[in-house]
Image (tube, grey):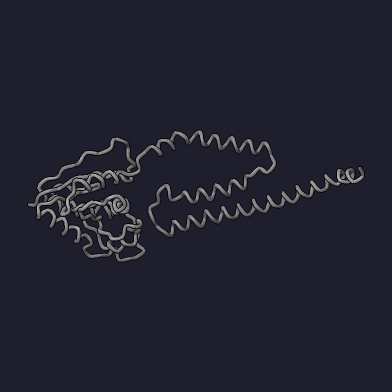
């Protein structure tokens, strides 16, 4: 009984010490997460600035995940029942508000290149030539297309493991970067075969030649990732094809479901030589 009485008398002291230890640990954790959050946001922003790419929404997924972990630790309620309930309510509200927009994104087709590749596998013959107007889609095309016809991107790239800008920059510095695909397209049409155009086809205005752009001689140039450069390349190729082909036919879409604009590529076939 005496031992029990002593333990009961010492319990408040031990509890206060335990609470003080937990409070210090919470303070250390909060300080660390606040510093990490500030440094992480600044460092990631600097990384994107140094990278100089045109960013997309998914570029920020890693940053948002890191921020969520830090903020969750900072706002951790410990033993506070009210704080726990409030945090659970905020999470439930967030899920309710994002459920409908998320369902729309999930049900959306993110590419139609797989459908295009399957169609070309059947329709294109070995001596045909497939031209993908958007070099970024070369990675997807390389994954899905296993047909007999040769294919290339604008500009002509050779490595489709990644969507890397460095090879594209090399074409920007070249004197005549489009010559290989123009010569291949000419050879294909002259021989009576077809050129399959996958992607947007920007045609020069009627009565005008395709525009030109100066070579990029500065490695720090802001042309990197510029859609204008890519569009001019496509217009130069289309200017050549439209001035020599006999006729072109657009293929109907093979899927009625909506497709994300980033990889919703139309297809047309060009034939004849004049």
At 12% from the left and 51% from the top, the residue drawn is: 193
Q: Pinpoint residue 23: horizontal percent, then vertical percent.
A: 72, 49
Drawn side of residue 227 relative to residue 51, left or right: left
At 69% from the left and 40% from the top, the residue drawn is: 80
Q: Pinpoint residue 244: horizontal percent, then vertical percent.
A: 11, 52
How many numbered marks appear?
Answer: 0
At 76% from the left and 49% from the top, the residue drawn is: 18
Drawn side of residue 51 relative to residue 167, left or right: right
Q: Pinpoint residue 270: horizontal percent, then vertical percent.
A: 15, 48
Which quadrant: the N terminus?
top right
- Residue that protrudes farthest toward the right in the picture: 2
Would you place residue 137 above or below residue 104 in this image? below
Would you place residue 119 above or below residue 166 in this image? above
Q: Nearer the viewer, residue 164 or 129?
A: 129
Drawn side of residue 135 relative to residue 89, left or right: left
At 43% from the left and 51% from the top, the residue drawn is: 59
Q: Quadrant of residue 261?
A: top left
Drawn side of residue 107 relative to residue 121, left or right: right
Q: Pinpoint residue 39: horizontal percent, then vertical percent.
A: 55, 56
């Amino acid at each position: 009984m005496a031992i029990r009485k002593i333990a009961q008398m010492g319990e408040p002291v031990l509890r206060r010490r335990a609470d003080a230890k937990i409070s210090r640990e919470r303070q250390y954790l909060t300080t660390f997460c606040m510093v990490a959050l500030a440094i992480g946001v600044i460092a990631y922003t600097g990384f994107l600035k140094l990278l100089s790419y045109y960013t997309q929404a998914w570029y920020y997924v890693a940053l948002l995940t890191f921020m969520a972990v830090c903020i969750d630790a900072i706002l951790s309620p410990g033993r506070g029942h009210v704080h726990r309930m409030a945090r659970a309510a905020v999470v439930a509200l967030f899920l309710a508000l994002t459920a409908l927009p998320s369902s729309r994104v999930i049900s959306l087709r993110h590419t139609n290149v797989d459908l295009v590749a399957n169609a070309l596998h059947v329709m294109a013959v070995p001596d045909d030539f497939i031209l993908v107007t958007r070099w970024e889609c070369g990675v997807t095309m390389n994954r899905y297309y296993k047909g007999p016809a040769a294919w290339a991107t604008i500009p002509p790239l050779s490595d489709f493991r990644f969507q890397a800008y460095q090879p594209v920059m090399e074409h920007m510095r070249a004197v005549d970067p489009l010559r290989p695909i123009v010569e291949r397209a000419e050879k294909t049409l002259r021989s009576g075969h077809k050129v399959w155009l996958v992607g947007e086809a920007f045609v020069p205005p009627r009565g005008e030649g395709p525009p030109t752009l100066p070579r990029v001689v500065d490695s720090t140039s802001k042309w990197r990732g510029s859609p204008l450069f890519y569009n001019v390349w496509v217009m130069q190729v289309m200017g050549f094809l439209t001035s020599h082909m006999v006729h072109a036919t657009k293929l109907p879409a093979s899927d009625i479901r909506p497709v994300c604009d980033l990889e919703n590529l139309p297809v047309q076939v060009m034939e004849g030589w004049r």
